[in-house]
Amino acid sequence: MKKYLLLFIFLSATSLAFTQQKNISLEEIWGGKFSTKGLQELRSMNDGEHYTILNIDNARGVSSIEQFAYETLERTTTILSSEENGVPLFSSYTFSEDESKILLATEVERIYRRSRKGIYYVYDKARETTLKISDQKIMSPYLSPDGSKVAYVFENDLYLFELLTGSTQRITTDGEYNAIINGVTDWVYEEEFGFVRAFDWNSDGTILAFLRFDERAVPEFSMDVYGEDLYPSQHRFKYPKAGEENSKVTLHLYKLEEGSTVDIDLMDAYYIPRIQWKNQADELSVQTLNRAQNDLKLYTVDADDASVSLLLEEKDQAYVDVTDNLTFLADDSFIWTSEKSGFNHIYLHKPDGSLKKQLTEGPWEVTNYYGYDPGSKSIFYQSTENGSIVRDIYKIGINGRNKKRLTEMEGTNSAAFSTNYTYFINTFSNTEVPYRYTLHKASDGKKIKDILDNSSLAELLQGYNLSPKEFSTLEINGFDLNMWMIKPVDFDPNKKYPLLLFQYSGPGSQQVANRWLGSNDYWHQMLAQQGIVVACVDGRGTGFKGRDFKKMTYRELGKFEVEDQISAAKKLSEYSWIDEDRTGIWGWSYGGFMSSNCILQGNDTFELAIAVAPVTSWRFYDTVYTERYMSTPQDNPNGYDDNSPLTYPAMLKGDYLLIHGSGDDNVHVQNTMRMVEELVQANKDFDWAIYPDKSHGISGGNTRLQLYNKMTNFILNKL
């Protein structure tokens, strides 16, 4: 009897433990239950011994800048609090170069992906005073090196604010909406070249270099804004679609002492994606690109006489990527990254631009360049040397010797270095470990202390039915493609499971990486709990496996990538536990373009597809992105049309769900509307949803929750 009693207790405890394992819900995912903690707006101080972070106490409505010592990780002081000295609640901060002033952002309003406008203040640390820059919402304020002035943009003109006198000077006067922009970028530069502030101070604060965008010839795009008013309004903005006119961009130098503007003749420059002052106050570096984006030139502009000289030129049969990986040393020799060896690596050039030495080499990629320490004469960078799905931090001498790996944990490592490169804060994660922040010595990578981890989240997730993300490679079309797969927790190889592929597939992108879970990962886990095998394959054209692998999709976006996804689905369907008659695919943006193509061109392979905010024709997308990979529609019409979902609506056989936000300024809802019309005329049945006034991210309020409920039900009912 005692034996049976013990057995009953054991079985009951086992049953209780099993029932305690929970399934993930969409309400938990989009309610933020699985969010991670991080270090907000970390800045290294000039002394290299301290760093600051932004602390926002939402409950009290207070924000503050807290200073910590690297060595001890202890808080040493509160530099500024919104409870003191008339400082308003601020959401971000920036120090002047000498750290005497702090620029504070309040009432920030989003414009597009990166651009913002707001009410800004300058806090003077020595005087403990706060000064508002303007009563109007302004863009991209930037303190001069000595903290005495602020340059900013208001209504497309460049202004200068003097802190000592409180006076404001208007530098340009021709700014006009949808016509002329001074000092900030137009829509396509912001989206595709990744920056907004298009002006820069020289090292002694005597000259402002700025770009001017003449977008009068750029075609205008309009979006209906439904809102809550009786009559909808329209948002009209300049958007250059592939093959159409771009802004005419010019470079100018404003000399403060003279109060005059000098126009710089860059001759054949079509795009000006970067400007950066050199160490000498009278020399500016400028990067230009031709329209095809396969010829990048790095110039030096002499501010004294406005002369321009070529420093370096990079050409490629496909395209040249624009990066921020440029550092000028004390003598104006410079560090630069390039793919010319077939992989992205670091190079040292002499002051005249000639090559001095290639500093890194091998069949792997430098994925982030952190900077140069003149004290130890070392360069710090992140790379894929230990595998394309992981990231590690390294240092190497300026002579290309004494390379040392500074991180040990296998997964994704990224670093934030102290100003003097004595320390770095490492952010680490993998599929098993949520984001962990640790302090290390930059000389050898030795860990000093733990700063912050997300162990509470890891403990929380122990109570859920989660499956491991399994990494492997799949041999497809002559290439070993990276893959991850999530199987149901109670996986039984004797059963048959439906397969759902997730992908993005855009040029240089990566979805198969050993890093912590994102929102879609939790959703995929939820689907796996419902008995679905979820997998992701990075096909040809994706990144971090070398130049040739990435650029083989040039002029043919949607050809090789679609072939790889169809082939991957077929190969996975050969597994005995995959039901080949229940195969789905989904993706967002470029991924929506892909999933649309796959269910049409792969209609004998896929039974279901979901396309969220998809491009359906590259003729509808912007010049910079599209022409970089496709050339113009006039030059490459077959490349545009042969790989467009609009060409194949009659091939639809499976279940297809189209989703778009009507306020998407990036991938316009025009893409979905044209796809809908083609499907209607082909007399095809499909499902679709339009989210009023929602942007490319389709979010806000309960939007994401409702969207993922819709996609979940579609998959569970159809697949």
Image (cartoon, helix red, strand yellow):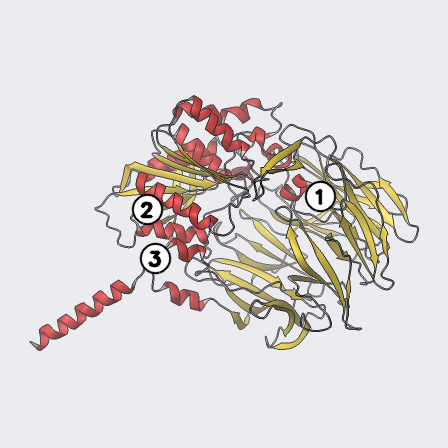
Pointer 2 local density, CA inside 10 Å: few below 14, some 14–19, many at least 20: many
Looking at the image, residue 242 sits to the left or right of residue 651; the answer is: right
Can residue 329 be seen from the camera position used here? no
> What residue would you read off at disc 2?
533
The residue drawn where x is 49% and y is 49% is 388
> What residue would you read off at disc 3?
466
Q: Nearer the viewer, mark 1 or mark 2?
A: 1
Q: Amino acid at mark 3?
A: Leu
Find out whether the residues at labels 2 and 3 contact each other: C-beta distance under 8 Å. Answer: no
Above-or-below relation of 523 to 232? below
The residue drawn where x is 47% and y is 26% is 677
Residue 295: which quarter of the image? top right
Of the numbered discs in the image, which one, if any, rests on residue 185?
1
Pointer 3 local density, CA inside 10 Å: few below 14, some 14–19, many at least 20: many
Looking at the image, residue 553 sits to the left or right of residue 607; the answer is: right
Q: Position of residue 574 (x, y in %)?
A: 29, 38
First in sequence: mark 2 or mark 3?
3
* Quarter placement of the C terminus: top left
**How far, Cα to Cα, is label 2 from label 3?**
13 Å
Secondary structure beneath dot 3 equals loop
Looking at the image, residue 474 sits to the left or right of residue 291; the answer is: left
Secondary structure beneath dot 2 equals strand
Q: Nearer the viewer, mark 3 or mark 1?
A: 1
First in sequence: mark 1 or mark 2?
1
